Amino acid sequence: MNKTTKNTHGSEMTDEDWFNLGKSDAWAGKPKVPPEQDAQAASMYDLGYSEGEIKHPPTQTPKAPQ
């Protein structure tokens, strides 16, 4: 998962970077905004976003049942 792609801002990001960005955006409650010009990066972003919606961020602790 280390393929490097160019994003729209000209900086290089790996597939893992896109995956982590998607997950981070989901955890932060941000809208899903995958890159439009790169199908591979968009796919990795979507995958990360989907996983982020399922799992809680490491800084958030689930509420204990009462």
Image (cartoon, helix red, strand yellow):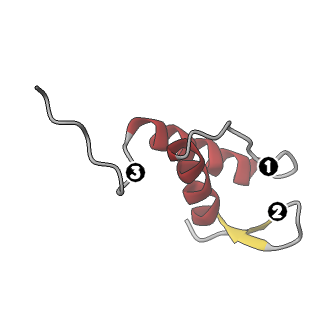
Tell me whether the residue at label 1 lies in contact with that at label 2, contact meaning CB atoms closer than 8 angstroms. Answer: yes
Q: CA distance from mark 1 to mark 2?
A: 7 Å
Q: Mark 2 = which residue?
A: 7
* Kind of residue sitting beneath label 3: Pro
| Residue placed most toward the observer, 9 or 44 | 9
| Residue placed most toward the observer, 21 or 5 | 21
Which is more N-terminal, label 3 or label 2? 2
Q: In terms of image quadrants, where is residue 65?
A: top left
Rendered location of residue 14, percent (x, y): 66, 69
Q: Categorize mark 2 by other alpha carbons within 10 Å: few (<14), some (14-19), many (20+).
A: some
Q: Residue furthest left?
A: 66
Q: In terms of image quadrants, where is residue 58?
A: bottom left
Q: Categorize mark 3 by other alpha carbons within 10 Å: few (<14), some (14-19), many (20+).
A: some
* Kind of residue sitting beneath label 1: Pro
- Quadrant housing the N terminus: bottom right
Rendered location of residue 13, percent (x, y): 71, 69
